[in-house]
């Protein structure tokens, strides 16, 4: 069961990443980002929101280890931390932030807890 949920979480990560990687304009709109004056913002979305998550998800599946899945969880924990800091400092739309932060926090808790929990040596 844990292995199946790990793979599903990693595939979800790849799926999220594919939006940023293949459809950065759609992703920018979904994240309330507006590219202006340069296409560098689209490049950043393809890299940080896209390719990074696509490869991290694929790598976790390829490695097939607790450490690989836990590391994916730590990436989500970092994203959740960024959302919390943004909540305090930037005051983004609460509903949208809560959805993204909730998904990221749930994936972080699962991937870290299931793979580095008490059963680990």
Image (cartoon, rainbow, N blue to C red):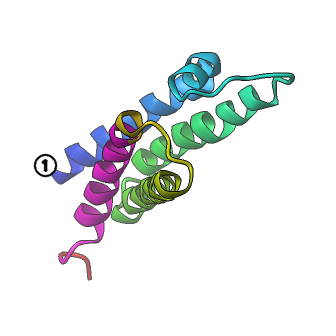
Lateral position of residue 49 relative to residue 46, left or right = left
Nearer to us in this view, 80 or 36: 36
For numbered disc 1, what is the local secondary structure? loop
Location of residue 43 with respect to 2 vertically, above or below? above
- Residue that carries the numbered disc 1 in the rendered image: 1
Which of the pair 27/60 is nearer the observer?
27
Residue 65 sits in which quadrant? Answer: bottom left
Residue at 63% from the left image edge and 17% from the top image edge? 25
**Left or right of residue 56: residue 39:** right
Measured as percent of width and height from the top left, residue 2 is found at 18, 53
Instruction: Give the residues drawn in magenta, as a range.
Output: 98-118
Picture quarter containing residue 121? bottom left
In percent of the image, x 46 and y 43: which residue is there? 57
Q: Is residue 104 magenta?
A: yes
Q: Residue furthest bottom?
A: 121
Main secondary structure of the magenta stretch? helix
Q: Nearer the viewer, residue 20 or 32?
A: 32
Query: Residue 111's x, y, as percent?
Result: 31, 57
- Residue drawn 25% across the image and 65% down it: 113
């Amino acid at each position: 069961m844990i292995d199946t949920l790990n793979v599903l979480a990693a595939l979800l990560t790849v799926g999220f990443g594919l939006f940023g990687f293949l459809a950065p304009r759609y992703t920018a709109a979904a994240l309330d980002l507006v590219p202006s004056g340069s296409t560098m913002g689209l490049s950043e979305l393809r890299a940080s929101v896209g390719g990074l998550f696509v490869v991290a998800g694929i790598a976790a599946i390829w490695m097939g280890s607790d450490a690989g899945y836990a590391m994916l969880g730590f990436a989500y924990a970092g994203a959740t931390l960024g959302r919390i800091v943004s909540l305090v400092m930037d005051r983004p739309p609460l509903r949208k932030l809560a959805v993204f932060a909730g998904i990221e926090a749930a994936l972080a808790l699962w991937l870290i807890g299931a793979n580095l929990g008490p059963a680990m040596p």
